[in-house]
Image (cartoon, grey):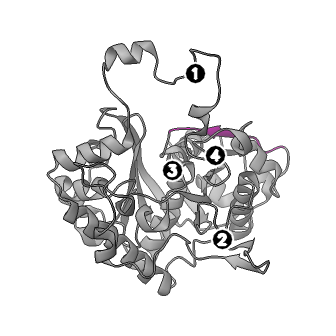
Amino acid sequence: MAEAYIVAAARTAGGRRDGKLKDWHPADLAAQVINELIDRTSADPESVEDVIMGCVGQAGEQAANVGRNAVLASKLPESVPATSIDRQCGSSQQSIHFAAQAVMSGTMDCVIAAGVESMSRVPMGLPISLPFKEGHGFYVSPSMQERYPNVQFSQFAGAEMVAKKYELSREDIDAWAYQSHQRAIAATQAGAFEGEIVPVEVTNEDGDKEMHKVDEGIRFDASLEGIQGVKLLAEDGVITAASSSQICDGASGVMIVNEDGLKKLGVKPLAKIVHLSVMGHDPVIMLEAPIPATKRALDKAGLSVDDIDLFEVNEAFGSVPVAYCKELGVDEEKINVNGGAIALGHPLGGSGTKLMATLVHALQRNGGKYGLQTMCEGGGMANVTIIENMQ
């Protein structure tokens, strides 16, 4: 079987809700990333055989196959097809897996995996809240209710359940949230994101134009005391808005090829995909899935936690990475070293390839060999991707 290689990885800087990226149509924003991947590899646009786009809020401007619309808004020819997929927060990480499986099978040689979410223009939960015929339209079916009686499927509740199961205090989680901002600040000031960010033009409130290239969610004045003072989301809980991922606009993508694709493009790989898997888990606690999924992935790959140089674990809520480190024995100095979604934002379907862009460049910068990416997903699932640095 052929190997799968990442030859380019890029993302936009995140935009706050109704912030700097609010005027970008999501298809156009995703097109900017697609164009950047083509430019970075000097690939013939016709050599791209498919685009797989992750997106959670597939309604409004993100409806009607936003992946195909992004292709039509880009420099790719009409002959390049595209599809849009939804594995909740792991949508574009699943895009990576589908793209890798295509090139590993030999049915394709060059595929772009990408993701986009404009949470300003397509509010979170919009597809669920759309009007339907009276008495119809709720996504939880009668059979699901029978299987899970008296259960409210909620990521907020799941975050609290994770904290309770792993005996995490508010102090533990607030400290992680503060660390996320501090690491994001340090990475930004050190230029660590420059190699992965695609600058896009935005218009400020005063009418002046600028190139948006700094993640807007980072609180450069963040203090632990300030985070500790934020009101709890649940009266008897430990999670606050300050220890949760930020609503975010953004797009990201990676170009994935096999050996024939490397020859056709005439490029050297940035990383090789050495493992990819996805796992279903308890849909009620929901956010715990990265822990058993990582255990299984490492076992299948013949690797241990100590073999992994860098981890990217999506910070949907602070309890997720804290529990992950505690249960798996992961050194906190190896995980989310440039900050996570608490500081940088979580553009839902755009986060999978966003984290991969960060992981690829961080491995190059740090000189590590193996990187592992995972994220919790609605419905109690988790993707795991392990890559090997080739630079």
Q: Is residue 4 visible?
A: no
Q: Earlier in the sequence, mark 3 or mark 1?
A: 3
> Looking at the image, do the residues carrying marks 4 and 1 touch, with CB atoms under 8 Å apart?
no
Determine the CA span between mark 3 and mark 1: 43 Å
Residue that badge 1 annotates: 137
**Residue 181 vs residue 235, the one in the foreground:** 235
Determine the CA span between mark 3 and mark 2: 27 Å
Q: Residue furthest left?
A: 167
Q: Earlier in the sequence, mark 3 or mark 2?
A: 3
Residue that badge 4 annotates: 53
- Which disc is residue 3 wearing? 3
- Foreground mark, 3 or 2, reads 2
Among the 4 quarters of the image, the one containing residue 313:
bottom left
SS for callout 3: loop
Determine the CA span between mark 3 and mark 4: 21 Å
> Looking at the image, do the residues carrying marks 3 and 4 touch, with CB atoms under 8 Å apart?
no
**Residue 78 vs residue 240, the one in the foreground:** 240
Specify the amino acid type for callout 4.
Answer: Met
Q: Earlier in the sequence, mark 3 or mark 4?
A: 3
> Looking at the image, do the residues carrying marks 4 and 2 touch, with CB atoms under 8 Å apart?
no
Expressed as whole percent of the image width and height from the top left, the position of residue 105 reads 56, 39
Total numbered badges shown on the rendered structure: 4
Which portion, as a residue range, is magenta?
Answer: 79-87
Expressed as whole percent of the image width and height from the top left, the position of residue 253 reads 61, 57
Q: Residue at x 73, y 74 (%)?
A: 205
Above or below for 195 versus 277: below
Q: Is residue 310 left or right of residue 49?
A: left
Residue that badge 2 annotates: 198
Specify the amino acid type for callout 1.
Answer: Gly
